[in-house]
Image (cartoon, grey):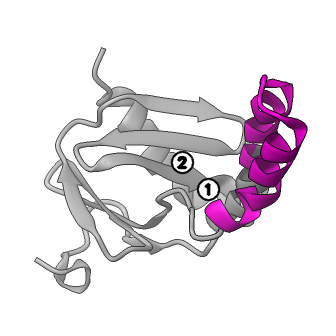
């Protein structure tokens, strides 16, 4: 079943925009990875080369962002920027920290950021995730 054929339910299906946070996360990942490389017992030239190669290694890395949310028959349909779609009867773990929400699905961790849509549109989905989370 494609994302376009999902019937609308109690809450309208929303399309989310791209977030600015994954680019920031990439820089944070480079900074965090460079610390142990610089403090390691490798020769200075080897650790310097590894730190210099981090931008190339992380060039294609991007966390899986949620791009579409829809509810149907008590289940949540999510799709990502990679055109992967799945139905969640119950979410796995859900972590929310500031503007970031991480959702564990059978296909890995998916991320949702508050700058992807207004909070009023995301609130019903946050409530569904909170009420249906596994304890």
Q: Give the structural element (helix, strand or loop) at label 1.
A: helix
Decide whether residue 61 is among the magenta residues. no
Horizontal relation, residue 51 to residue 22: left or right: right
Who's the residue at 80% across and 53% down the image?
Answer: 49
Q: Please name whichever residue, 107 or 103, is drawn nearer the observer in this view of the structure.
A: 107
Query: In this picture, is 21 found above or below 108?
Result: below
Horizontal relation, residue 113 to residue 105: left or right: right
- Asked whether disc 2 touches disc 1, contact meaning CB atoms under 8 Å apart, the reply is yes
Q: Give the structural element (helix, strand or loop) at label 2.
A: helix
In the image, the segment drawn in magenta is 29-58
Quarter of the image where the C terminus is located: top left
Rounded to the nearest angstrom, the CA distance separating label 2 from label 1 is: 5 Å
Q: Quadrant of residue 130?
A: top left
Which percent across, then down, holds residue 101?
A: 56, 42
Q: Please name whichever residue, 42 or 74, is drawn nearer the observer in this view of the structure.
A: 42
What is the crowding at mark 2: few (fewer than 14 residues within 10 Å), some, or many (at least 20)? Answer: few
Q: Please name whichever residue, 64 or 19, is drawn nearer the observer in this view of the structure.
A: 64
Which percent across, then down, holds residue 39?
A: 84, 25
Q: Quadrant of residue 8?
A: bottom left
Who's the residue at 65% across and 69% down the image?
Answer: 59
User: Which mark, by number, is residue 123?
Assistant: 2
What is the crowding at mark 1: few (fewer than 14 residues within 10 Å), some, or many (at least 20)? Answer: few
Identify the residue under disc 1: 120
Query: In this picture, is 81 found above or below 36?
Result: below
**Count of numbered badges drawn on the protein:** 2
Q: Please name whichever residue, 26 or 21, is drawn nearer the observer in this view of the structure.
A: 26
The answer, for residue 6, to whether it is visible in the render is: yes
């Amino acid at each position: 079943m494609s994302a376009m054929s999902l019937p609308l339910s109690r809450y309208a299906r929303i399309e989310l925009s791209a977030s600015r946070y994954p680019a920031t996360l990439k820089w944070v990942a480079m900074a965090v990875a460079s610390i142990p490389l610089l403090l390691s017992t490798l020769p200075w030239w080897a650790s310097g080369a590894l730190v210099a190669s981090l931008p190339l290694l992380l060039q294609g890395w991007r966390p899986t962002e949620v791009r579409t949310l829809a509810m149907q028959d008590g289940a949540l349909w999510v799709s990502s920027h990679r055109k992967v779609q799945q139905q969640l009867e119950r979410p796995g773990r859900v972590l929310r920290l500031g503007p970031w929400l991480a959702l564990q699905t059978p296909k890995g961790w998916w991320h949702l950021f508050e700058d992807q849509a207004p909070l009023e549109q995301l609130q019903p989905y946050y409530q569904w995730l909170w009420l249906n989370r596994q304890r």
